[in-house]
Image: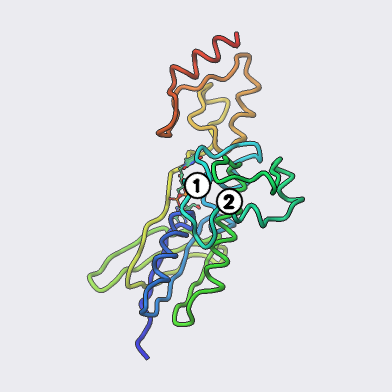
Amino acid sequence: MAKKKRVALVGGGPTAVYTLKNLLQKADGLHVTIFEAGKVAGCGIPYSDEFNTPDMMANITSVEIPPVMTSLADWVRSADRRWLSKFGVRRDKVSDRDYYPRVLLGAYYVDQLEQMIRTAAPWHQVDVKTETRVLDIIPDGKGFELTIANKEGKSSRRFNAVVLATGHLIEPTTSRASSRLYRSPYPVGNLELARDEAADPGIFAESHRRSRGAGWAIRRLRRRG
Ligand SMILES: Cc1cc2nc3c(=O)[nH]c(=O)nc-3n(C[C@H](O)[C@H](O)[C@H](O)COP(=O)(O)OP(=O)(O)OC[C@H]3O[C@@H](n4cnc5c(N)ncnc54)[C@H](O)[C@@H]3O)c2cc1C
């Protein structure tokens, strides 16, 4: 039997989930290893409950999210009713055009990743290494040597191919002593720091294409007086 090609996915967020979906459609056997620095693989950073509260909404509707195994709307329709009520979501009211909390979207990706691995064709092998950070990648013409760090310490692993799916760089929480400007509301604890200050927080910029822009946000804050 031919040796399985070894593929490393560095980062275990939504990009890794969709990449894995495509890799698992290959007829040749692959041994895929997902390295995720965080505790949970699948949700990435913007949709994890470590960085969000349940009331923080995603800015895309379920119909805009490409289905992994199931569409997001169908997944919500079959989710536990009591768990959904924590987000104020009712199964009988679910529509393809709904916006959902980021944490719920994260739970969808975590579940879909698990399902995909469980149902992968027998000629593939998928390993997920959480709390494991890739520190370095060295190509040598024949493959790649990855330096990884986890609770056991540092070690090296060789792969035939590497996919970088490391997403955004989230800045560490800005300390109150250093500045009154918070470069990011993530993790959400940053907003708690802002609340201690005398002034209301203002929004200077937004990263998304559908954002109405800083001018709109500032005018709105002014109107609220
Ligand atoms: C604050 C914020 C909010 C967003 N909200 C939305 C939204 O509402 N709607 C929308 O469409 N898009 C949103 N986005 C865009 C969003 O980034 C993507 O939708 C999605 O998260 C991209 O997934 P990803 O897997 O590429 O990156 P990420 O979700 O960032 O996942 C990358 C993963 O890689 C891991 N990682 C990073 N470096 C290493 C390493 N060296 N070793 C091992 N693991 C590593 C991280 O821990 C993380 O889990 C948002 C982005 C940000 C920053």
Q: Work out whether mark 1 precedes mark 2 in sequence or the reverse, and give the earlier one.
A: 1
Where, quadrant-wise, is the N terminus in this rendering? bottom left
Q: Residue at x 47, y 60 (%)?
A: 17
Tell me if 106 is positioned left or right of 17 in this view.
right
Q: Is residue 196 left or right of residue 204?
A: right
Q: Which residue is mark 1?
A: 63
The picture places residue 215, in percent across and down from the top left corner, at: 43, 17
In the picture of the structure, the residue carrying the numbered disc 2 is 73
Regarding mark 2 in the picture, which secondary structure is present there? helix
Give me the disc on residue 92: none
Gap in angstroms between the C-alphas marked 1 and 2: 8 Å
* Residue lying furthest left: 141
Relative to the observer, which residue lies in front, 182 or 80? Answer: 80
| Residue at the (57%, 66%) spot, across then down | 114
Percent coordinates x, y for residue 43 in the rendering:
54, 53
Q: Determine whether the residue tagged by mark 1 lies in a helix, strand or loop.
A: helix
